[in-house]
Image: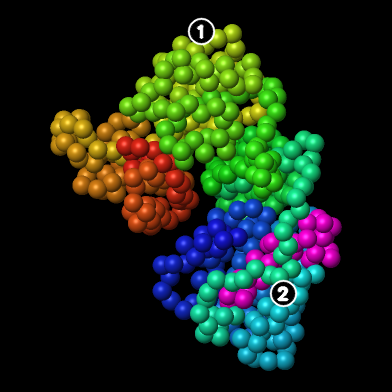
């Protein structure tokens, strides 16, 4: 919920006008794009409903504010495929109902919000009585409590109080010492946004619900936010990538999280898989991204530190499958990877990815249900759907395609060709982007390197959002050395 709020704030930070309707719409969009987990997605829908309730009004009175609260609760309930009482949905409903009742008695905005806060606190206390899992664990619903805190922050602001750290509710007890895992494990919390035009929201909702549990599918014809718990994230991702382009993809291993919460070392059975994935990456951020996309073994290496054929062979031999797809993710690694197929008894196919953005695009095209040959073909085709911009510094003076480069100049490579220089990374990136047709850009993902300053990352992101107002712009940490920025442009 915190990350969802931060994303909403990011979308309204540059607004400098007292127009509630515009602020509400921008905050709802930001919340949807950054929503994570069940509670985050539901919170984004509360924001969306609130924006709908505000409509085109630049300001609202007490009754209109209460009506917007109520619309937020209504939209959130509609978004959840299987609504459950004793969750933040209940808290939202009780809070909005109290706000409406208060607005019938007073025109004081503060009193309306105060009534919503009090009702939210009471509803949170009752969640333990409504859900067996909460009663057994001795805790209240976390999402509901988070919503209570948000409302209390709203109230403090209206009353002119300073916003300070809050204390945990007294009803929160220590978690049980042992919580049994399901026999098949908890599966993977899988989230992403589908971008496109005329997206079939209802069809996607039905298909996602069929493929997992705790499914949430919200959005409209241009952007659909998906959250689902599934044992086969690759299958879900494969389906979604056929509907539209994907962004903000995240896959978390809930079984590993469970082990950590129980104070245990995650122990995964070494079971056999139909097909395994091996990929090369440089940087802890890129490693985490590849692992979240289902890569079984990530081999360290990349530009200036290419892994050997022996390194790649060891990774192929270590994965629990007789069929293996290898993504070199660097043009200089492809030949070494091709040798592996001749040195192992396993069936190995090389997807000739020349950059990390290409490798990630290929993984989004992976279909768990398809065979090795079909996957290799589909993933190779996906490589053509993304442009890669890499930013680094020249190690010596040179001239490339009429472009004069001095030693230590910032240079930008577009799909492996040097196309621009500059005094700073943002200048070189702008030059590389000039080579692309801006009208066709739908998604830009920035992977920041280990040495990229935080303030510069934010400036770059804002610059990209201004340059491509209709595109989805996302910032992630690749943590790669030597290259402060790697961009995927689709």
Q: Is residue 404 magenta?
A: no
Q: Is residue 31 above or below residue 359?
A: below
- Side of 247 relative to 449 (left or right): right
User: Which disc is residue 342 wearing?
Assistant: 1
Which region of the structure is painted magenta? 127-154
Q: Quadrant of residue 79?
A: bottom right
Precedes in sequence: disc 2 or disc 1: 2
Quote the CA–CA distance across marks 2 and 1.
65 Å
Q: Main secondary structure of the magenta part?
A: helix
- Side of 54 relative to 118 (left or right): left
Query: What residue appears at the point 51 percent right and 7 percent down from the top-left corner?
Result: 342
Query: What residue appears at the point 59 percent right and 56 percent down from the top-left corner?
Result: 35
* Local crowd size for mark 1, using a 10 Å CA cut-off: few (<14), some (14–19), many (≥20): few
* Local crowd size for mark 2, using a 10 Å CA cut-off: few (<14), some (14–19), many (≥20): many
**Residue labelled with disc 2:** 121
Q: Is residue 432 above or below residue 270?
A: below
Residue 152: image x %, image y %?
A: 62, 76
User: Which disc is residue 192 wearing?
Assistant: none
Query: What residue appears at the point 32 percent right and 37 percent down from the top-left corner?
Result: 482
């Amino acid at each position: 919920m915190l990350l969802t709020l931060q994303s909403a704030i990011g979308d309204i930070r540059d607004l400098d006008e007292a127009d509630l309707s515009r602020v509400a719409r921008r905050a709802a969009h930001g919340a949807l794009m950054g929503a994570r987990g069940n509670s985050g997605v539901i919170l984004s829908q509360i924001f969306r409903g609130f924006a709908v309730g505000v409509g085109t009004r630049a300001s609202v009175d007490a009754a209109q504010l209460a009506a917007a609260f109520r619309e937020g609760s209504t939209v959130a309930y509609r978004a959840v495929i299987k609504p459950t009482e004793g969750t933040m949905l209940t808290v939202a409903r009780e809070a909005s109902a109290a706000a409406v009742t208060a607005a019938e008695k007073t025109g004081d905005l503060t009193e309306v919000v105060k009534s919503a806060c009090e009702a939210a606190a009471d509803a949170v206390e009752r969640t333990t009585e409504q859900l067996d899992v909460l009663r057994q664990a001795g805790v209240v619903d976390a999402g509901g409590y988070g919503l209570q805190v948000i409302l209390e922050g709203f109230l403090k602001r209206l009353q002119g109080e300073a916003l300070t750290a809050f204390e945990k509710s007294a009803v929160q007890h220590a978690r049980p010492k042992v919580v049994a895992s399901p026999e098949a494990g908890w599966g993977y919390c899988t989230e992403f946004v589908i971008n496109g035009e005329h997206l079939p929201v209802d069809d996607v909702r039905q298909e996602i619900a069929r493929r997992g549990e705790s499914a949430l599918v919200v959005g409209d014809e241009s952007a659909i936010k998906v959250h689902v718990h599934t044992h086969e994230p690759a299958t879900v991702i494969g389906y979604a990538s056929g509907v539209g382009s994907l962004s903000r993809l995240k896959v978390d291993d809930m079984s590993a999280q469970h082990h950590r919460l129980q104070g245990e070392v995650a122990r995964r059975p070494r079971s056999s898989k139909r097909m395994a994935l091996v990929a090369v990456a440089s940087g802890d951020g890129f490693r985490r991204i590849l692992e979240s996309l289902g890569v079984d073994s990530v081999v360290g290496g990349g530009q200036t530190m290419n892994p050997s054929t022996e390194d790649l062979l060891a990774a192929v031999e270590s994965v629990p499958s007789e069929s293996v797809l290898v993504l070199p993710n660097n043009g200089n690694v492809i030949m070494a990877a091709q040798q592996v197929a001749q040195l192992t008894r396993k069936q190995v196919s090389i997807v000739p990815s020349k950059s990390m953005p290409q490798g990630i695009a290929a993984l989004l095209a992976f279909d768990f249900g398809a065979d090795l040959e079909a996957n290799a073909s589909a993933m190779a085709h996906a490589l053509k759907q993304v442009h890669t911009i890499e930013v680094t510094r020249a190690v010596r003076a040179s001239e490339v395609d009429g472009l004069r480069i001095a030693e230590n100049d910032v240079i930008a490579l577009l799909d492996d060709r040097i196309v621009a220089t500059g005094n700073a990374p943002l200048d070189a990136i702008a030059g590389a982007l000039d080579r692309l047709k801006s009208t066709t850009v739908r998604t830009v993902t920035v992977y920041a390197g280990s040495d990229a300053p935080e303030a510069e990352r934010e400036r770059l992101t804002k610059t990209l959002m201004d340059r491509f107002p209709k595109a989805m712009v996302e910032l992630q940490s690749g943590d790669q050395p030597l290259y402060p920025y790697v961009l995927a442009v689709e």
